[in-house]
Image (cartoon, rainbow, N blue to C red):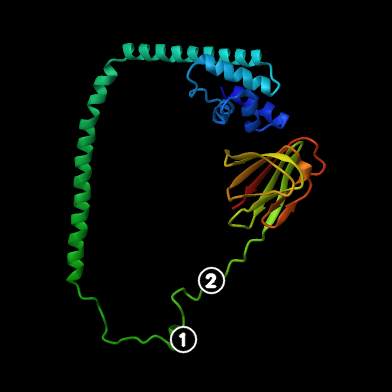
């Protein structure tokens, strides 16, 4: 089902439409549209409503609705076939291996025996150490009656054998372009504890933001607006109109987006 959801989302992003716009066109609530993109069809009350929503969504983003429904029917058929096969294998296993269930009943008894053995071993070890401690307490340590004085030099030394800890130099803060292929750009941020990203808009732009693979926001921004993004190990940003966006990452500015006429995906990973 996720393949159908990916097709719908990809087509919508290529159209530069947000879920709010699709919701207004199709009269389908935004949360249901989001579930369709995720391939989660369990919240729909019936197959008729589900197929209707798939058709409307597909037509709104320029896809062939009949092909989407055909993909759905094929997925359902494949799922049923797999479930039937698993059920048959389970029934066959239950019929051909009744003895296994009897053997499993003896496992708790064996486990109890091992537990008792373990208790005796641990108890014996503790008793032995206790007896050894009593013997050692009765002994008087040997001494020649002369207390040796430590040299004055040693009094000033610490207990670290003369080793002086060396302060570790601070890591250099860097933003490195790791790769740039087509509309996929990857940056590596290093030498920082917190990642701070700010998007500054000089024109209208549709934006989708994901962190650690989870959707954070999807919205349209206008000229003069800005968006701050919190800390995470990995941030993925899709821009519908890259030339009108300036991106600042912990004081570094990404300014190589003016040459893109199509949507671009930017990944910013925090190292360390």
**What residue sits 57% from the left and 16% below the top?**
51
Q: Quadrant of residue 244?
A: top right
Position of residue 6 relative to residue 134, above or below, is: above
Q: Quadrant of residue 146?
A: bottom left
Residues 239 and 71: in front is 239
Position of residue 258 relative to residue 125, above or below, is: above
Q: Give the number of callouts.
A: 2
**What residue sits 56% from the left and 28% below the top?**
29
**Alpha carbon separation for disc pair 2 and 1:** 20 Å
Mark 2 or mark 1, earlier in chain: 1
| Residue annotated with mark 2 | 165
**What residue sits 19% from the left and 50% below the top?**
123
Position of residue 38 relative to residue 130, above or below, is: above
- State the quadrant of the N terminus: top right
193 sits left or right of 129 in the view = right
Q: Position of residue 105 (x, y in %)?
A: 23, 25
Q: Position of residue 248 (x, y in %)?
A: 70, 52
Of helix, strand and loop, which one carries label 2? loop
Q: Quadrant of residue 215?
A: top right
Of helix, strand and loop, which one carries label 1? helix
Residues 187 and 20: in front is 20
| Residue annotated with mark 1 | 153
116 sits left or right of 156 in the view = left
């Amino acid at each position: 089902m996720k393949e159908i959801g990916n097709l719908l989302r990809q087509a919508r992003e290529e159209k530069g439409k947000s879920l709010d716009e699709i919701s207004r066109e199709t009269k389908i609530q935004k949360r249901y549209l989001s579930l369709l993109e995720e391939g989660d069809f369990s919240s729909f009350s019936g197959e008729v409503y589900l197929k209707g929503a798939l058709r409307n969504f597909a037509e709104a983003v320029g896809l062939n609705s009949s092909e989407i429904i055909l993909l759905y029917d094929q997925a359902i058929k494949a799922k049923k076939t797999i479930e039937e096969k698993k059920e048959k294998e389970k029934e066959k296993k239950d019929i051909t291996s009744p003895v296994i269930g009897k053997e499993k009943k003896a496992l708790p008894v064996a486990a109890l025996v091992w537990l008792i053995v373990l208790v005796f071993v641990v108890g014996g070890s503790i008793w032995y150490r206790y007896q050894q401690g009593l013997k050692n307490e009765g002994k008087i340590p040997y001494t020649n009656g002369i207390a040796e004085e430590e040299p004055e030099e040693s009094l000033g030394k610490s207990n670290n054998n003369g080793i002086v800890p060396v302060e570790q130099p601070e890591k250099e803060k860097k933003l490195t372009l790791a790769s740039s292929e087509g509309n996929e750009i990857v940056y590596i941020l290093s030498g920082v504890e917190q990642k701070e990203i700010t998007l500054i808009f000089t024109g209208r732009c549709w934006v989708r933001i994901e962190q650690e693979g989870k959707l954070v926001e999807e919205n349209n921004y206008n000229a003069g607006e800005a968006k701050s993004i919190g800390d995470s190990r990995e941030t993925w940003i899709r821009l519908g109109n890259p030339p009108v966006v300036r991106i600042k990452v912990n004081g570094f500015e990404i300014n190589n987006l003016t040459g893109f006429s199509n949507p671009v995906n930017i990944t910013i990973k925090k190292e360390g």
